[in-house]
Image (cartoon, helix red, strand yellow):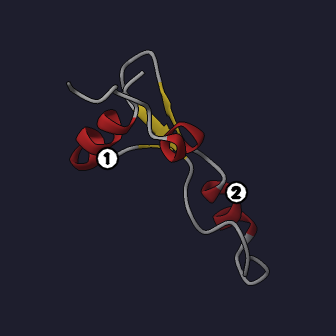
């Protein structure tokens, strides 16, 4: 008997599926060592970005539901 399909618990905390079917994620690099960064760099890192097409298959597999 096949195993029950479940959403990856780490992916559901980090990724969101939009109406268009694209997957949105946060950018890395904003946890620490930010004092030397310019305000512009920190502001743009705070924005969300879409998962790249090359990684979309892995993202969709993790987000079953």
Q: Nearest the camera: 57 or 26?
A: 57
Of circles 2 and 1, the one toward us is: 1
Residue 39 position in % (x across, y down): 75, 66
Residue 15 in picture, x, y percent from top left: 51, 39
Disc assigned to residue 11: none
- Asked if disc 2 and disc 1 are in contact, CB closer than 8 Å, the reply is no
Residue on which disc 1 sits: 52
Q: Indicate whether 50 appears above or below 65.
A: below
> Is 13 drawn above or below residue 30 in the view shown?
above
Q: Is residue 26 left or right of residue 2?
A: right
Q: Residue at x 28, y 40 (%)?
A: 56
Q: Residues within 10 Å of mark 2 (few under 14, many from 20)?
A: few
List the single residue furthest toward the right.
Answer: 35
Image quarter where the N terminus lies is top left
Which part of the image, by quadrant, shows the C terminus?
top left
Element on which disc 2 rests: helix
Give the mark nearer the N terminus: 2 vs 1.
2
In the rendered image, which residue does mark 2 sit on?
43
């Amino acid at each position: 008997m096949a195993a029950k399909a479940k959403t990856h618990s780490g992916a559901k905390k980090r990724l969101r599926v939009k109406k268009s079917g694209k997957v949105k994620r946060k950018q890395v690099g904003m946890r620490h060592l930010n004092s030397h960064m310019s305000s512009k760099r920190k502001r743009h890192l705070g924005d969300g970005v879409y998962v790249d097409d090359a990684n979309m298959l892995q993202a969709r597999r993790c987000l079953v539901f």
